[in-house]
Amino acid sequence: MAHVLITGGAGFIGSHSCVVLLENGHDLLVLDNFSNSSPVALKRVQELTGRSLECVKGDLRDPALLQKLFADAKAAGAPIEAVIHFAGLKAVAESVADPLRYWDVNVGGSCALLASMDAHDCRTLVFSSTSTVYGESETFPLTETTPTNPIHPYAQTKRAVEQMLTALAQTGTWRVASLRYFNPVGAHPSGRIGEDPLGIPNNLFPFITQIAAGRMDKLRVFGNEYPTPDGTGIRDYLHVMDLAEAHAAAINHLLQSDAPLSLTVNLGTGKGLSVLDVVHGFEKATGITIPYEVVKRRPGDVPKLEACPKKAANVLGWRAKRSLADMCRDGWAWQSANPHGYRKAS
Ligand code: NAD
Ligand code: UFG
């Protein structure tokens, strides 16, 4: 068991991962500036697990703060042994409109973090990367050796950090894992924590749950003339609790390795679903009708992303276990109990 720094731990994937990591016995220090999350999420993580975690409000790009976190932990006799780095910006359209901000937070922030880690002899890191680094591929499923082709600043910043990590690993002193998430959805089965986007959701699944909760009137399906069986875009949706479990597997794998390590691993189910598959799956799981209309394609969307999940199984011993019905049931349990997310919640 280790003392692990979790950047962005209050966010969607971070909060679910904190639950699993605490349940696995790790001690956690969360750094988050709450730019896209609420401290309530962390309060609920502690309620769910019956364990406490330490949380510091602050920015990843603040070297003095990072220095203090590492130094204080060492002085207290519990040095930070590893980092899981979730903090970052993730909205594709926003990254096209404001690329500098994405390079600053995603790449500049990672650079500051890695420099502090290095200075404090902490060289074990799990990084949140994305399936969008593959861009538009002709061959499926996507394996970790499929050439990358990041087509927007968001994906480019994630790819840049991956490259920074590969270079660090080549120095022979780091253990790093870039986890390429496909499309995480759903929520903890308790309905106490879940995805809480600010404003109008960019992503399909929270849009659907907000329609079900009466916050949106209908879904706009972005194009139905893609070269897919029903013409709508295909993605590899996975349950966020499966993804959280992958982080526990990855950090344990790195911590157990005696040798330097540089891993890149896809995290998906291996089974792509279309937009309409998700709509109908949600309707079946919840009994709620989701009205939709087909509109034009969203710029930057690719027809299909689908993982080859074999490396995750072979190297990490991890595979996604939960079904689309589980994702819909748990996502709806969260949204229906928290129609406005964490706002006004305690
Ligand atoms: P999220 O926005 O819910 O969580 C990110 C967290 O980082 C938030 O709590 C936010 O407040 C914090 N943060 C942002 N900038 C920060 C800064 N400068 N300093 C400190 N904290 C900061 O997003 P998420 O969905 O949980 O995603 C987590 C990571 O996984 C991100 O890096 C994202 O790019 C990546 N990712 C997400 C998805 C997805 O579909 N959700 C897919 C692939 C990759
Ligand atoms: N879609 C709609 N209507 C909507 C929202 C989405 O039809 O209102 C469609 C999209 O066109 C796409 C599919 O639903 O075909 C999934 O779209 P999302 O926005 O939910 O997910 P993306 O695959 O575009 O991107 C997401 C995150 C990225 C992350 C990526 C990982 O936004 O940050 O998953 O694969 F990197």
Image (cartoon, grey):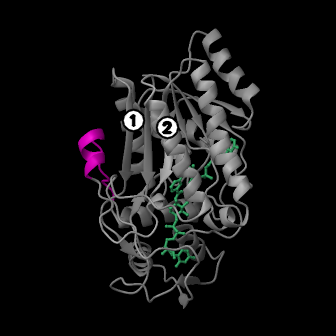
Q: Which residue is mark 1?
A: 262
Q: From where the camera sits, is residue 195 visible? A: no
In front: 314, or 106? 106
Residue 314 colored in magenta in the image:
yes
Q: Which residue is at 37% across, 30% downward? A: 261
| Apparent side of residue 148 relative to residue 54 in the rendered image (left or right) | left
Query: Which region of the structure is painted magenta?
Result: 310-322
| Apparent side of residue 243 relative to residue 27 in the rendered image (left or right) | left
For the residues labelled 1 and 2, say whether their Cβ atoms are less than 8 Å apart: yes
Q: Position of residue 116 (x, y in %)?
A: 64, 25
Q: Which residue is mark 2?
A: 165
Place residue 336 in its image quadrant.
bottom right
Residue 24 colored in magenta in the image:
no
Which image quadrant: the N terminus?
A: top left
Q: Position of residue 244 (x, y in %)?
A: 44, 45
Q: Position of residue 255 (x, y in %)?
A: 39, 25
Q: Which residue is at 51% across, 82% downward? A: 290
